[in-house]
Image (cartoon, helix red, strand yellow):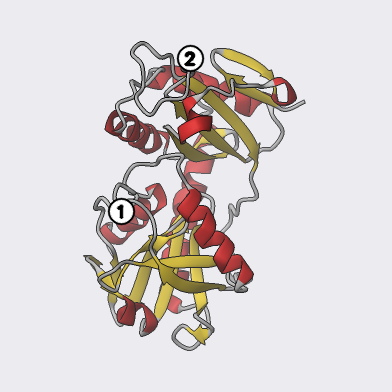
Amino acid sequence: MTQVYLNGRFINQQDAMVSVMDRGFMFADGAYEVIPAFYRVPFRIDQHLARLDFSLSSIRIENPLTHEQWRGVFDQLLAENAGEHQSIYLQVTRGVAADRNHLWPKGLVPTVLVMTSPLKMRLDESLSDIQGITAMTTEDLRWKRCDIKAIALLPNVLHRQRAEEAGADEAILINEQGQVTEGSSSNVFIVKGNEIATPPKTMPILGGITRDLVIELLQAGTQYKLSERMLLQSELRNADEVWITSSTKEICPVTMLDSQPVGNGNVGPVWHDIAARYQQYKLQLAADYRKNPPI
């Protein structure tokens, strides 16, 4: 039976219930994180918890748990639930109010939910079987504080649904200035010649944990020029390679954009290089986990 953590208790998922007056239900008033775990050990947990701190402070919710307490919750769920590799979902809302009112009353106790699910994840350096995905561009309809990982995801849902109905795997969002922001649930990179470019972390863009790791790997010593700058839609269309990144998608090559091939229509050599470095990073961590399991 799958276990979840809800407001201080570990219970069966089917028994987990929250009040209809929870402000997360009424107003999408809360924040969340998604954290991959390899061999039941959370990946880049410090970075995820730091981003959670930022999101909660930005919407004026005090973090209800310390980092040590979050780790303890994750460890117990990962140990009890099925899957050597799992995805952790955590959500914190402002809590349950007595009535529906845009103003929040003082003294609310945040609602805390953590659950996990099995995660299909590559942990080897063989990338020859990777096929590119398709993407479409669409107008960015989201709010101006996308740097907050808020649970109010209706625009993202609509973008992703539109892509699905158009036969695409992801929607890449374009703002009113004709600039690339990000995907419906991912960050965006392009390759042109020797340059790898991605939009900078500003308020319209979520600071992706995988995005940051890709940048770390590029800065660790590669032959490529890294640029964090705004990208025009025309640059996206004319790129040699396009990638999207996220904690669950990792680094995913886009080979078709708006029904047109990206570059030559194949998974590109720069992607193969950086994706291999990413896999090597994970494999080294996995080896360290097996050699010295966290206590």
Decide: few, some or many residues near mark 1? Use Cα within 10 Å; few <14, some 14-19, many ≥20: few
Give the quarter of the image for residue 18.
Answer: top right
Give the quarter of the image for residue 19.
Answer: top right
Q: Residue at x 43, y 14 (%)?
A: 109
Q: Nearer the viewer, mark 2 or mark 1?
A: 2
* Disc nearer the start of the sequence (2/1): 2
Residue 26 lies left or right of residue 14; in this view the side is left
- The residue identified by callout 2 is 98
Specify the farthest residue to the bottom.
264
Q: Residue at x 62, y 41 (%)?
A: 85
Is label 2 in contact with label 1 (beta carbons under 8 Å)? no
Q: Residue at x 48, y 19 (%)?
A: 99
Residue 15 higher or lower than 165, as above or below? above
- Residue 216, label in figure: 1
Give whichever of 49, 161 is nearer the camera: 161
Residue 238 higher or lower than 41, as above or below? below
Give whichever of 90, 45 is nearer the camera: 90
Specify the farthest residue to the right.
1
- Which quadrant is home to the N terminus? top right
Place of residue 73 in the rendered image (x, y in percent of width and height, measured from the top left): 53, 20
Place of residue 125 in the rendered image (x, y in percent of width and height, measured from the top left): 55, 61
Residue 177 lies left or right of residue 51; in this view the side is left
Could you say whether the residue bearing mark 2 is in a helix, strand or loop?
loop
Q: Residue at x 60, y 30 (%)?
A: 115
What type is the residue that disc 2 sits on? Ala
